[in-house]
Image (cartoon, grey):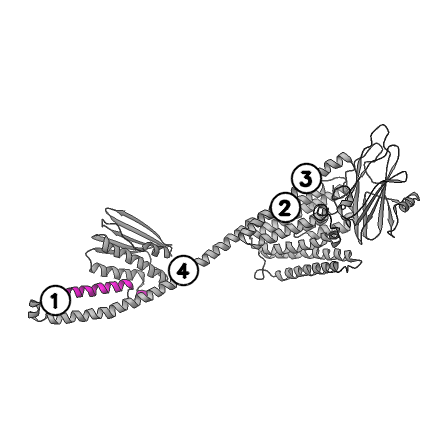
Amino acid sequence: MAYPHVGFYFWSNLPLLKTIYLITLWLLWPTLAPSQPVVPIGPGTPSTLNGYLETFTDSTGRLTMRQIKAVYEQGKFNTMPGSRLLINYTTANHWLHIRLPPAKPQRSAVAAYLEIDNPRINRVNFYQIVNDSIINQAITGDSLPFATRGFPHYNWVFPVLPQVGMDTDVFVMLSKHGEILSTGIRLWRANAFEQYDRSRYLLWGGLAGLTVLVLLLNGMVWIATRDALYGWFMAVVVVTAFNLGAASGLSFQYVWPNAPVINNWYPQTISAWLIVLTHVHFMQRFIGQVAGNSRMVHWVNRFKYSIVACTVLTIGLLIFDAVPGNFFRFLVWVTLFFSAMVVPLAVLSLRERIHQREPIILFYAAITAIQFLTLALFFINLFLTRAGRPLFTMPNEGLVLVNYLIDLIMMSLGVLYFGFSNYRQRNEQLLTTLHQQQQAQSGRIIEALETERNRIAEDLYDDVGAMLSTAIGYVSSVLRTPDVRERFPLLTEARHLLSRAVDNLRTVSHNLMPKNFAELGLANSLAETIDKVSASTDIRFRFIVAGEERRLDAGTEVQIFRIAAELINDIVKNSNATQATVQLVYGPDTLLLMTEDNGPNPPQYTNLHSKVAFVDGRIDSDVSPDGVTVQVEIPY
């Protein structure tokens, strides 16, 4: 079964192809008489209402039921060619009439339901007349509270019970306030209608539950990630659900049953504009359209501003009750304009980026292609159904729901996947930036420490070293006298100690920062340091450089020198070794610093691991009774 309000809903869920459906809805719908299941209610009742429905237009809008009955008896009602009524921009009252045959005396009367399948009708008056007496009536419409319908249904449904031996006349008055009146009329056997009606409500209930589930999932992710993309996707879903509820009549039944004034505020049209607005803005956020990567962004933004301006203008006119007579026609043209503009803007926005083969752009284009295929099937089935050769028996609203599920499920999965990917990339960028800032801060600290080390080394060597050298000179001059050497033998020992102190001071100063380190480089500075250490200890050191030497940044080379100095210092002080080897191997991607000694004692490092971690290195050590081997691998 097809619904005329389905078009607005379908249009609201297509990001690129909304124009096609709207134009068809308002311009071609009269020629598309959809397949409608009509159930006979007894013998002699036709299986279709074609040729049995009659209509009369009350242009005054003042005729009463009695007067309409007289007009009918005068033969002024005209037979409708089909079972669908379509009147453009009408303010008149349109009357429908159908006569049901009497029920057979030997059989119980079969209850029927008369359904008017457009829930957006301002006034609907139903009368069942038998022998000039009104035995059943309902005065209702979407401008009155929902309870006036009598039968709880989102469409207009009126129970009819034919009388035994007497014809039953059914009159229905339909009225719209300057809008398009388009509705189908169906007559159902009671049990068939109830069975089909349960399936429809079950379908709507399942769709509502899925919508709430998707909103909850995206809401939790939005709270966790604080990414506005999820919020805008939720806005698209909420506005689309509102549009669907307003178009189907479900919102009037369950959301605002006692506030019919909302139905006069064009909720379906205004929500359709908001769908375009949120969908376009969501597209921009989803594909990352900004001024830096798109020339279309300014045109898309102007388009969004025009939607906001029209929405504010319309709401203002409604608030101050200043709506002109042809306002609905204005809304139709504005909606057509928005529909016509959103297609090229969205296509051009995707075309700008699709050549880059970005996964998110390809995903959005694929979703659009799937929706286009669904829309094409929808129209093909409508035309073939009209010709009596439908592609499939699924009702047209089923295709609409398939499209909505595609938009709801697949787009939601895409938002979650690409949203998390962007969130992870942003976190990685933040961590990288934080690491770089920490390295820069550490570099500044190390630079300050190195400056202080250089100052201490210079002070030790220039000041303390000079004083010790002067003291050695004084002692040496005294020791040139033979009597002094004989009387004070300890002075000779003191001179030796002073000489050793000068040597040790020179070594300490050199380890703090070798002179001309920047010019010599890491390998030459280590070679010079090892030569001096070998001269002052009994351990035989050997230094090996392998690979093509490459210079690193000054801070990294200083840290590697500190690491090597601590390894060498530990061998001298703690290992009790007699032989040691220091290797510096320049590989293609990493620098390997390796020390080996034959000492039996394990190493006793102080802050070696922190120094290695600072240069993102990795340290491995092997301690055995035969000696200690340490490898430090440092990436370039």
Quarter of the picture containing the C terminus is: bottom left
User: Counting residues from the N terminus, which is met first, the one under dot 4 or under dot 1?
Assistant: 4
In the image, farthest residue toward the right: 74
**How far apart are the alpha carbons under marks 3 and 2?**
14 Å
What kind of residue is marked 4? Gln
Visible in this render: residue 409? Answer: no
**How far apart are the alpha carbons under marks 4 and 1?**
52 Å
What kind of residue is marked 2? Thr
Magenta portion: prevailing SS class: helix
Residue 82 spot, x, y in % from top left: 82, 43
Disc 3 and disc 4 in contact, CB within 8 angstroms: no
Residue bearing mark 4: 439
User: Counting residues from the N terminus, which is met first, the one under dot 2 or under dot 1?
Assistant: 2
What kind of residue is marked 3? Leu
Q: From which residue to which does the magenta span run?
A: 496-519
Q: Quadrant of residue 309?
A: bottom right
At horizontal 9% and vertical 65% (from top left) the residue drawn is: 489
Relative side of 182 to 232, left or right: right
**How far apart are the alpha carbons under marks 3 and 1?**
110 Å
Q: Determine whether the residue tagged by mark 4 lies in a helix, strand or loop.
A: helix
Disc 4 and disc 1 in contact, CB within 8 angstroms: no
Quarter of the picture containing the N terminus is: top right
Q: Which numbered tag is attached to residue 491?
A: 1
Disc 3 and disc 2 in contact, CB within 8 angstroms: no
At horizontal 33% and vertical 67% (from top left) the residue drawn is: 451
**How far apart are the alpha carbons under marks 3 and 4?**
61 Å
Residue bearing mark 2: 211
